Image (spheres, rainbow, N blue to C red):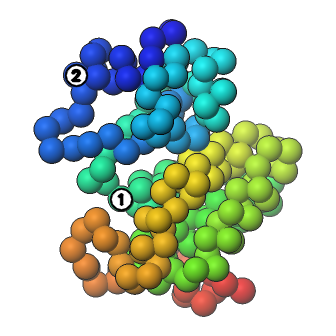
Amino acid sequence: MGVTMRELLEEYAGGMKDGFGFRGVLPGGASTDFLIDKHMDIQLDFAGVAAAGSRLGTGTMVVLDDQTCPVGFVHNLEHFFAQESCGFCTPCREGLPWTEKLLWAIEQGRGREEDLELLLRHTEWLGPGNTFCALAPGAMEPLQSALKYFRDDFERHIREHRCPYHDPEPAIPHPLTSIIPITYDHLHR
C-alpha cells in the first residue's frame, strides 16, 4: 500500500516480459477502470487510485500488454459478468448479455460506428443506482475506461471489419447461438 504502480510492476513484479509493452492495468481486479501509462507514478492507495479514476477493489492488478486486443480483453470480462448475473434485475439480466454480444460482434468484424455510442449508453444504464447490486456497475467500469483509453482499437475493428491483433479467422457464431438464435441484426433492434 502506497508504492507507485511503476514500482510494483517494474521492481517487485519484474516488469513486462521481453517483447511486450505495458498498455494498461485494471488496478483492483476485473471490475475496476483501466489506468494507463500516464498513471504509472500514482501511489497505490485508496486516495491515489481514486484520484486517477479507478479503485483498488480487490487489490488484484490485471495488466493489459500491447500484444493483447483491448476489445477482446474487455469482451472476455463482459462475458464473465454476463454469466454471473443472478437475473434479479432487468438491467443486469438483459443488459450484460446484450453488451457482451455487441462486443463479440465488434471483435468478429461485424461492428458499426454507432455501436460505440450504444456501448457508452450501456455504461450509464447499467451504472451505479440502476441495478440492485454492484455486479453490472462493476462490469461497466472496464468497458467505459476501455472506450476512453482504447477507442482507436474499437474504431479500427469496425473500420477494418476484423480484429487487427490476430490473423483474420472465419466469423464464428456466438457461443449461445445453438441455445438462443442470435443474429447481428437482433442486436440493433
Mark 2 lies on residue: 14
Q: Residue at x 68, y 71 (%)?
A: 117
Residue 113's x, y, as percent? 58, 80
Mark 1 lies on residue: 69
Viewport quadrant of the C terminus? bottom right
The image's mark for residue 169 is: none
Q: Give the side of residue 79 with respect to residue 99, left or right.
A: left
Which callout, 1 or 2, points at the residue further toward the start of the chain?
2
Image quadrant in which you'd find residue 48: top right
Q: What is the CA distance from the residue labelled 1 to the residue labelled 2?
A: 23 Å
Residue 168's x, y, as percent? 25, 79
Amino acid type for the residue under numbered disc 1? Cys
Residue 54's x, y, as percent? 61, 33
Residue 104's x, y, as percent? 47, 71
Q: Residue at x 36, y 17 (%)?
A: 7
Q: Nearer the viewer, residue 65 or 43?
A: 43
